[in-house]
Image: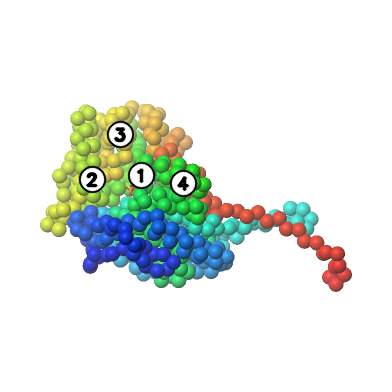
Amino acid sequence: MSLVRFPESVVSCRNLVGGEWVQPAEVPTQEVRSPYTGEVIGRVPLTTASGVAQAVEAAKVAAHDWGLTPLRERTQRLQAFRELMDTHLARLANLAASESGKTVAEARAGLLKGMEVCDFALSLQNLDGGASMEVSRGVTCEYRRAPLGVVAGITPFNFPAMVPLWLFPIAVTLGNAFILKPSEKVPLTACALGELMVAAGYPPGVFSLVHGAKDAVDALVEHPDVKALAFVGSSPVARHLYAEASRHGKRVLALGGAKNHLIVVPDADPQLTPQAVVDSFTGCAGQRCMAASVMLAVGDVQPLVDDIVRRASRLEPGPGMGALIDRGAVDRLETAIAKAKADGARVLLDGRGVRPSGEAYANGHWLGPTVLDGVRPDMEVAWRELFGPVLSIVRVTTLSAALKVENASAYGNAVSIFTTRGAVAQTVVEGAKAGMVGVNVGVPVPREPFSFGGTGESKFGHGDITGPSSLDFWSHLKKVTRKWSAGTDGSWMS
Ligand code: NAD
């Protein structure tokens, strides 16, 4: 287990506008505190509409030439950025961990996943050359992929590097100028990514960084020169942003929260299943949109439940499991556990008050693994996103009853089935509502070039944020029909 290395001094985050690091004028700043220690590790400006307008203006200027730059040249810049990420991997992983509460290993994995997205974008120079066809004698039709201009991404706290990296490598490679508005809770990693984009030689304004919260988001939503917005965060904000950005005539894809189900049946592999379930609900302290939240226990799976509790009870929050983002998250989760107990759930493992040893962690934000049994589908812990290391076990007698509970969820990000029988797995693959389905996999994140995205309240909009459909999101297809004739005087051609 790697301990988190914190920045040596408090980092003052600035916006990146037109290739320059600038402090937006006369705006409040907010402290960035490490979830591990509660200490201030950074300060972030809360940019308002005028700061956003400056960034959009600079991006608009950059977008013109960048959009006309050949794909191969744009790709060379991304190759340089990817190499820099590789060189700075350890530093980036520590920054992401120190501000988000992730473990260093998880932060590193997120960066590697981001580099896979870069690989996908790098492959476009070989794959996505458009298409042309002779449709009648002397007439060809051609598809050309054209950028949209200025586009933006708004990202959550729990993946400070990976989620931004889902977005901008593809968007800029397709010729757009991209503005990132990272979560104000984790702005340090975004600054480091911005430094690497500058060092990679992108022209000023092709990649911009605007820090802030609601005001900055509202300004991006309302700005007429921002043509597309990708959002990743909680469902209430995703729903609101989808409606508002659509009303302002933008292309928008908004990924929301999740309530993921793991279906465990009696023939599940007794070696693989308990550890996969534990890793899924405790990893990253449960702060993953793909984390297990509800276990649908079908029939008699008591030995598996006992093993899950045994394994989870050996874990403690801290550098090996991660910290919750802030005090508010701890309070919210503790209240939810107390309410579930009052509603009749049995607390098989109680993480309240569990904290890592060591003075350094005295002011961190902690909750140990928690397992609730006898949860009914109508209880709040069974349907509301909790975003912490809490597993609610709902007992059902049949697979179809399990699917009924999964299908009734307002969300639809991920579901996994644990079984050794293909037919059981196939029933879940076909019958589940969720957009991402795992078979004996606790966190069924598709790897590139397969795309990422859920259904229901987990995603507002059409297509996925990565993979092939992301190309259509960040560009439009220009259709060219050409006809050449010899003209009136073609005598010199013979
Ligand atoms: P959040 O919704 O609070 O914040 C996300 C972004 O929206 C941030 O940049 C924030 O500054 C901005 N924001 C917050 N409130 C806003 C408002 N009222 N108006 C406009 N902008 C606002 O989410 P979070 O707490 O940072 O992240 C955790 C959430 O993100 C969880 O719900 C998790 O499931 C979800 N998430 C989803 C995915 C996915 O792929 N579906 C991936 C990661 C995280």
Whole-percent x, y for residue 375 in the image: 27, 31
Q: Which residue is drawn at 16% across and 46% down?
A: 354
For the residues labelled 2 and 4, the Cα–Cα distance comes to 29 Å
The residue indicated by pointer 4 is 245
Tag of residue 382 = 3
Q: Which residue is drawn at 38% across and 44% down?
A: 237
Q: How far apart are marks 1 and 3 (CA)?
A: 17 Å
Task: Of the two numbered discs 4 and 1 on the same chain, state the one appearing first in sequence.
Answer: 1
Q: Residues within 10 Å of mark 1 (few under 14, many from 20)?
A: some
4 or 3: tag closer to the N-terminus: 4
Residue at 23% x, 61% y is 41
Q: Which mark is residue 234?
A: 1
Earlier sequence position, callout 1 versus callout 3: 1
Q: Whole-Å distance between the Cαs marked 4 and 3?
A: 31 Å
Q: What element carries label 3?
A: helix
Separation of marks 1 and 2 at Cα, in angstroms: 15 Å
- Residue 346 visible? The answer is no
Secondary structure at badge 1 equals: loop
Q: What residue type is labelled 3?
A: Ala
- Queried on whether the Cβ of the residue with tag 2 lies below 8 angstroms from ligand 1, the answer reads no
Q: Do the residues labelled 4 and 1 touch (CB within 8 Å)?
A: no
Q: State the separation of the CA atoms marked 4 and 1.
A: 16 Å
